[in-house]
Structures are given as C-alpha cells and as structure tokens.
Image (tube, rainbow, N blue to C red):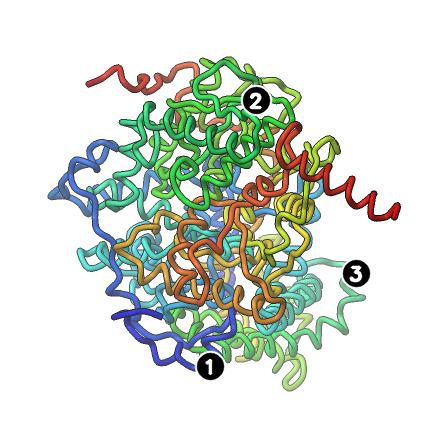
Amino acid sequence: MLTTVYALLYYVAFAVFAGGIAWRVYEYAKTPQPANIVTTPAPVTRAGVVWRMFKEVLFFESLWKSNKWIWIFAQLFHASLWLILVRHARYFIDPVPALVVLAQPFGKYAGLTFVLGALGLLARRMFVARVRYISAPSDYLMLLLFLGIGISGLSMTFVNPVDIVGVKAFFLGLMTFNWQPLPGSPALLIHLGLVALWMLIFPFSKLVHAPGVFFSPTRNMVDNPREKFRPVPWMPAVSEVSFDPPHGTRK
Amino acid sequence: MAEDYKVIEELTTEEAQTDPLYVPEPVDGASEHIRSFPAAAEFEEKLGYPGERPANWQEVALNKMDELRGKFRSFRLFLDICVKCGACTDKCHYYMGTADPNNMPVGRQDLLRSVYRRYFTLPGKWFPSLVGARDLTEEVLDEWYTYYFQCSECRRCSVFCPYGIDTAEITMAAREILDSVGYGMKYTNEIIGKVFDIGNNLGLPKPALQSTLEDLEEEIEEDTGVPVRLPLDEPADILLVTPSADFFAEPHIDGLIGYAKVFHATGAKWTLSSYASEAANFAMFIGSYENMRRIALRIRKAAIDLGVKRIIIGECGHAWRAAYQFLNTLAGPCDFLDPKYPVPQHICEYTWDAIQAGKQKFDKSQNDHIKLTYHDSCNVARASRMGDYPGGQFDIPRNIIKAVCNNFYEMPEGTTREATLCCGGGGGLLTDDIMEIRKKGGSPRMKALKQARDEYGVNKMAAICAICKSQFTKIMPDHGFAVDDIMSVHQLVSNAIILPGSEQEKELMEEQTEERADAAE
C-alpha cells in the first residue's frame, strides 16, 4: 500500500516537475524580447555573455555586489544543494559513477551546511524588517519545506540510518517499472513526501528562478544594439509606417 | 529640507542626514500622499488611450497585462522569478529618501505582481493569501498610480538583483496598463502630445528655435570673435538631435554652445532639425512602444530628408538610452547612413574622438575656478555604452572633463558609475506637483555631493543629462549650493576650447610670448 502510494506520487511529481519546467522554458523562449535592454556595462561579445552568466549563476556576482549576508547564506544553500544532488545520484544509478562516489563524504556534510544556509535565509526573512515586509506566507513555507527535507535527510544520515539498499531498489524499480517495496522508516517517508511536494510546486512557484535566470534579458543579451538590428516582432517594418506630417502644414 | 513635507523620524538622525547610502527601517505609507496630477482626457486620447475610465476597466487592465506578458519576455519573467531575497530592498533612492516600503524595488514590483499572481498563476487563483495575491480593485489601481510614478526607471536595482530583475520594466508596463484605462500622468503625456504637435517637449516652434539659434550665434561671436554657426534644417553630414531643454534652460544651453564650438573647430557640416527637435522620448517612460516609435521615427525622417551621414545625440540620459537601445529597433535599420559610424553616436564620443585626434586646443585654466565632480546619469550608466568597450560610458565623459578641467574629484564609491544614484527627477517625475518625492529621492545624491564638497572642496557638479541638470538646479539650493553649480560637460568644453582665430587664441599667444620673454630675461 505504502509502496503504491509513493510510487504513484513519484510518477505524478516527476511528470509535473519535468513537464512544468519544460512548459515554463517554452513560455520564456517563445516570448519575444523586442529591444535590447541589457543592464550595462555589459559584454560586447557572445563569449563575454557566457562568462557573465557563468559568474552570475555559479557565483551570484550581482548578489555579491548587493549584500554579503544574503550572498553567504545563498551560497551555502545552493552549493550544498548541488553536492547533495550529486550525492543522491547514487540512489538512481547502478553502478555508482566515480564522481558520485567522490562526492559522497562531502555530500553527507553538505546536508548540514544546507540547513545552515536555509536557517540563515529564514532568519533574515524574520528579523530584517525590509525582508519581512516583502515576505508572503509561501516564502516562509518554502524555507520550512527545505528545512524539513534537510533535517529529515540528516536524521537518516547521522541518527537513524535507513535501509538505503532498499531505497535504491525502490527507485531503480520505479525507473524500470518493476516496483520494489519501499522501506517503512518514518524519517524516510517524511523526506520523500516533502521532496515530492517540492517537485510538485517547483514549476508554479518562485523556484522557476532556476531555469528562469538563463532567460533574463538584462543579463543574457550582448551589448550590441547599435551593431545588430532587432526588429519588434509585433510591429510593422519601418518600410510600412507613416511619419508625422511636418509642422506648419496644419493650422 | 523644506516646508511642509512629511517628516520621517527615521531620516532625521545625524547618520541619516550624512550617509549617502543610509538605509532606513520601513515606515508604512510614508510617501503614499505624494501623487502627481493625472492627465486630462484630451491628452490621453492624443496618445491613443481612452479619455475616461471604461466601465469594464478591470477587464481592460487585465487584458493589457496579459497582452504585455506575451509581448515582453522581461515582464513575464520578472514577475515570475523574484524569490524575495531582499537584495534590492535598500537600493532605491526613493526608498532611501522616504522609507516607504512600497519604494523598495521589490515592494514596488509586488504592487503589480500580487495582481498578476491572482489572475495568471495557479497558486494565486487557488490560495491567494498564501502567496500574497490580491484582486484588482480601485484602491489597487490608485496605489499603482501613486507608486509607479515614484519610480525614475533608473535601473539601479537591476544591477544588484541576482536575476537582473529591472523594476523599470515593471514600472513601464504598469504605466502602460494605467494608460490603457485612461489613468495616465499629466506631465509625461502632455509633453508627448507637444512633441506630436510641435516637435519638442518644450513646445518651441521653428521660428522660436531659429531665433534662439541666431541669438546664440551672436553671443558666441561676441565672446570669441569667431562666427560659429548653429544651422537649422540645412543639408549636412551630421544631424544633431538634442533635448529641447538645450535650446532654453540653464545650464543646458551652455552645453549646446559647447557642441557648436566643437563642431566648428572640427570643421563638421552639421545641422539641427526643427522636425526632430527633441532627443527626449517620454514615451519610453510610460512604456508605450507605439508612441515611442512615433517619436523615434521623426529622427529617421529628419535624417533622410536632410541627407545626413550620421546621427549624433546631445547630452541627455534617457534620450541616450532611447537612442542607443531603442532607435535602431524602432526606427531602423538605418542603412541610409554612413556605415563607418555607429548609429547613433553620443556627442561625448564625437568630442572625445576630436580631443584624441589632437587638433583641438584647450586652455584648461579657464576652468580653474571650478572644483568639479561628475554625476553619472542613470540611463547613460546602466542602459547604454559609449565607445567600443563596456564601461566607456563612464570613462569618456571623465576623459573629456580631464582634458578641459584641472580639478576633478569623484564622489564616494557606491554612488558613481554603475551604482550611481539617480538625481531624483528621472523617469517622467520632473514635475513640480511632486517636488516632495523629487527632493527626497535626490537626497542620497545630495549627501554624496556634500561629502565630496567636505573632502575636496568640490564646488560644481557636471552631468550629461537634461533632466539631471534641471532637477539639480531645483534641489541643490536646499543643500548649500547655487543654482548654477550644476554644469553641462560641454559647458566646460566651451569654456576651455580655443577656436582658431578667436580672441582667446590671441590672448593665449600673447601670454605665451610674454612667458617666453620673461623666461628669456
């Protein structure tokens, strides 16, 4: 029964997650950006833009300029998340690739820094009046969701180990449509339930900042409006327009 | 500060009065009373908007919002991806100057984002209070009008946002939505109408322009003994399009004299146009591509009619953005111009090229009574470039200044270049009916200027933006400066340039002969 519920939950969650993100990306890709509105100073070559985006996405360059505290917590949070994701790949791939084996010890402790980062962000949200003002209940709940995922995960790593061989069998079974029983540890059920919830809300929430940042026109455009002509797709060409009449021709 | 403006306790401390980047704690509703006059029906209609609010205005507004998110990726994306991290919350000069949380960039965006969420996202439709979504009511519309006209679209927030979210894009869209239900701003929309009717923001018809230019020619000749021309509607190689304030206001007009002298000294064949007698494009402020294009097309037509090879834009911040980022898109391609030159060029690029060519003579001592600082105008800094490398927009004006002026000092770090603070009057706010927001929004810049004064004895500030210059003549007197302590960059050029055959050249040569004689003795 439990296995069936979680199996179905994960099929649905994955479909919503992948389909939803694909839909968002499609929306952003098809919506035109008529004028070049890059925030300057900006790179004047495509390669320069790739470098700018690289610094932005991995090192949060703008956030660094902006606020060191947010930067520290955000880096703790996101860098840890990457390590955790890589480490978790071992539950979905057999045999486990070398990179994932390598990430294992770091990934374990990344759980701690992940929770620390989330707590830092939560503290700012609660105690900095400006940030509190702009926070909706969903902004707090999002952080609590991450804390729930992180703490339930840590409890399995450091307090009550679960049958991870069984967990891996369950997920490999899901992927090959050959269901295997899910171990019944409460921490595991909470952990997996919250992760599924995270996947379900991802495409409908601010979490779309992850794919979205790549589409940000103030960051991803080359500073070349004088060199490259970009017509407005929904306006007639300049050859088809009429001009205001010269002045003095009317009363 | 002044008279009967609302006093915010937070902003009266010593630190708040001196630190240009002082961040107050939020005070709800601190600037909710500052509202510009809405536009009358005839001015809305002239721009293609309804004169009266339609009975089904909610539907119209939401349809407009839907239309805009299909036309502008910036708008759709920026509404979706904000994570409310708070990085922008202390970056807006209007927030710093008023402490009103709706003037925090994200606070301002949320006024519209909350409505977008309610009608266009699943969580907002299902759980509005969970995600801070709200219905579009009349109060919300009024709130939009109040606070979207307390934004100067300066893009300072977009520099600091980890996703590059630019509040200016949201403000422009919001103003377009307001206009779509007949709720536009008097100042911006009357001015756009004037451009359509007469050709420029100030409403100067051709005869007035003509006589102004003739007066200036006389003035220059009296001053220098050289007949420098300011041609209007004459066939030429260069079309100069400049903000109409350059024909009228101080210190703008001294900048225009500077351009004329540089053109004269370089032997350029240039002209102004009475049809395209305005570089400003206030339609950008209200986010209206249709109206922005109508104004931009004037430059195209004038360039074709006058048979010019290149277009040069005078000193103006948002006009330089409208030209640099929008002219090609809205009125291009300009393949009838000489491909050797970028389209368009900035007057500072032209002057700096001339200085680098080394053929111009300058007497820098003419500016020795000045201890100068330079104000980077927002649109020049964050929405354009000069020269061929990123950041040329910061260096080229400074290079010019240093070539004509001996005493130059920077304002404090964090208030210049890409982090420059707005003058407080940009984005269509340069109207006396909202002087309170202009003065409060300009206060961070004023504090930075006063630091430069206290540290280096700075007594003048130069800028290359018509709006900045007008704004500073209004707010600098509150801070112990004179009305004419704000200068055009080309005014400094004008002071120092030695025109061939001029009185100044003769004087300089005499001085040099005397010096040589003295040295010989």
The span from disc 1 to disc 3 (Cα, nearest Å) is 56 Å
Q: Does residue B118 sit above or below A152 in this rendering?
A: above
Q: Which quarter of the figure is the C terminus of chain A placed in?
A: top left
Task: Work out how far the residue at label 1 is from the one at label 2, CA to CA, in angstroms.
Answer: 51 Å
Q: Secondary structure at mark 3?
A: helix
Tell which subunit mark 1 falls on: B
Q: Amino acid at mark 2?
A: Arg
Q: Say if labels 1 and 3 share a chain.
A: no
Around disc 1, counting alpha carbons within 10 Å, would you say few (fewer than 14), some (14 to 19), or many (20 or more)?
few
Residue, x 22% and y 56% (percent of image)?
Answer: B142
Using the image, determine if residue B20 lies above or below residue B471.
Answer: below
* Residue A68 relative to residue B472: left or right: right
Q: Pointers 1 and 3 in contact (CB under 8 A)?
A: no
Residue at label 3? A99
Residue B108 placed where, x, y %?
37, 59
Q: Nearer the viewer, mark 1 or mark 3?
A: 1
- Say which residue label 1 marks: B14
Q: Is residue B73 left or right of residue B48?
A: right
Which one is nearer the viewer's eye here, A3 or B206?
A: B206
**Along the line of sight, the residue nearer the viewer: A230 or A177:** A230
